[in-house]
Amino acid sequence: MKNSVEKYLLENGPSLSSEISEHLVKQHGISAVAARQRVSREGKKAIRLDLSFPRRARFLYLRDQSGKGIFWNRLESALLNTNSAYGYALQALEERGGIMPRNHFEIACGSPIRQQKHLSSSIILKRLQDTNLIKEIEVKGIGLCIYKGIHFNHVESLIPNMKARLLAEDMILRAFSDWLRKMGFVAYNQVRIRSDIKNPNISTTAWDLAGPSYLSPLVTFKSDGKPNPGFIACDILLTDEVSLIGIKPFLLKLNSLRSLKKVGKQLCFFVANTFHQEAFNKLKSEGISPTTVSTLFGNDVRSSLLELIRLLSDTALQVVAPEKIDKIFSSLGKIEGSAGQLRGAFFEYIVAEAMRAESHQIMLNRLCQTVIGPKEADVICVTNHSIKFIECKGYNPNKRVTLDEVNYWLNEQIPVFRTFSLTHPDWKNTDLIFEFWTTGTYELDALKRLEEASKNTTKYIINFKDNVQVHKTINNTKNSALIKTFSDHFYSHPMEVISISRK
């Protein structure tokens, strides 16, 4: 016969020990002390999650409930109901599709980098990883990422949406940073946006964008009369809609910052596509500017960003019409620095379209899982007699592929792709071709390394193309729309960049 604790967990799902104790008090009329003792005694078959809760409560669950939907729903509810920093961190991850770059965690989780009487973001991340609630994965083009453990069996499906969101957010952060500088909101050369190296900080907190400001309402003066600047702080989340729960970690982080008396005043922004009305009202009531992309840069940019995210998030999409790429470039290419990012995002679709006529199957962004590890192939072209893997580098025309990039392709990627092909039932007896395409050029040592590899390799074929050779391949397709899009935006794109201005 199951004891009262097991019975409660079966009927109600994973629960806090304090919740079970309260139930026993009401159900059996025993004292609170006796109820806690019974939970401790009869709950030995239940698993205790190694996370701290108020009043020494523990989260209990049965073995067959571990990792299932009810486990996650009940855990997140318990964490948020107790205002746990772990709950806000998991919620921040959920709001971003369940996955984010690891270095963005300190920005999004709601906790400071380090601050007295607060759990630091690094400790929270370690505890969540130790309990397998958060796991890590290396993502091509992004680096080390973290994701919710519930997505372990399908994490690859989350990656395209993350990449699309990050691309859109990065373009808006750059444009907003430029706007703030030109309007005099921030010290011109001191505004920073998030990066792979170091995130912008204000005292103990990390932000997507931050910089000192000498606007008169934000400046205070020291005893010697010298100005003490305030700060501009901004976070961004370009999902469909930002909800009230979606801004809770942001507010928690801001409250930690505002509690520090020696830190200058802040003018804060939260940028989104749209806000739920409750979220919008809450931000306004806290003195924060809820800013939308359309408010900043107009509806045309917002529509193009949404289309960009939709296209790049669609895992089933294997072709993008050149006309759509042209339209997105025309709208978003005005944003400073965005043209290069768009080339990187769309070049593989250009390559796929160029190879479509000579292939009976085209695959994009295929994750090749092997015994020596996983690697993502940009474009795979399948014919009756060969399998061609194309590595795509959509660079600015003046950017050169480095020796390190070439060595990584030759030594790390090709062995995985070859192993994958040799174990594939339909590919193992076909010719293997590996090609490296760039819309830029090659460093001399990189070019020499490719030439040597091409000459000395006998088990498969190695080819490579620079911008001129890629342009020739595109022209040979006789596809007028493809030729125009490539010529306008990948090959002969002007070097000067036009900063965006709202019409």
Image (spheres, rainbow, N blue to C red):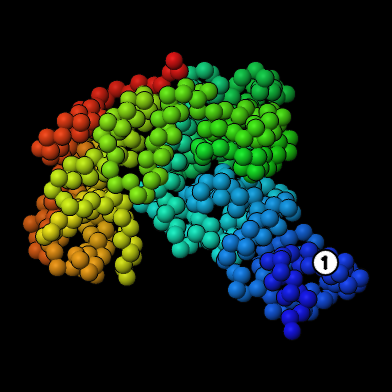
Position of residue 417 in the picture relative to residue 450 (left or right): right
**Residue 379 location in percent, x, y?**
25, 50
**Residue 90 location in percent, x, y?**
60, 53
Position of residue 464 in the picture relative to residue 137 (left or right): left
* Above or below, comparing residue 309 to residue 498 in the picture: below
Q: Which residue is drawn at 55% across and 50% down?
A: 93
> Relative to the observer, which residue lies in front, 272 or 398?
272
Which quadrant: the N terminus? bottom right
Position of residue 224 in the picture relative to residue 382 (left or right): right
> Relative to the observer, which residue lies in front, 258 or 477?
477
Q: Residue at x 44, y 46 (%)?
A: 162
Which quadrant: the C terminus? top left
* Above or below, comparing residue 345 to residue 148 in the picture: above
Q: How many marks?
A: 1
Residue 435 visible in rendering:
yes
Residue with the mark numbered 1: 23
Q: Quadrant of residue 462?
A: bottom left
Secondary structure at numbered mark 1 = helix
**Residue 3 location in percent, x, y?**
76, 79
Q: Residue at x 66, y 23 (%)?
A: 218
Residue type pointed to by label 1? His
Position of residue 338 in the picture relative to residue 222 (left or right): left
Q: Quadrant of residue 197?
A: top left
**Residue 464 location in percent, x, y?**
15, 48
Residue 226 visible in rendering:
no
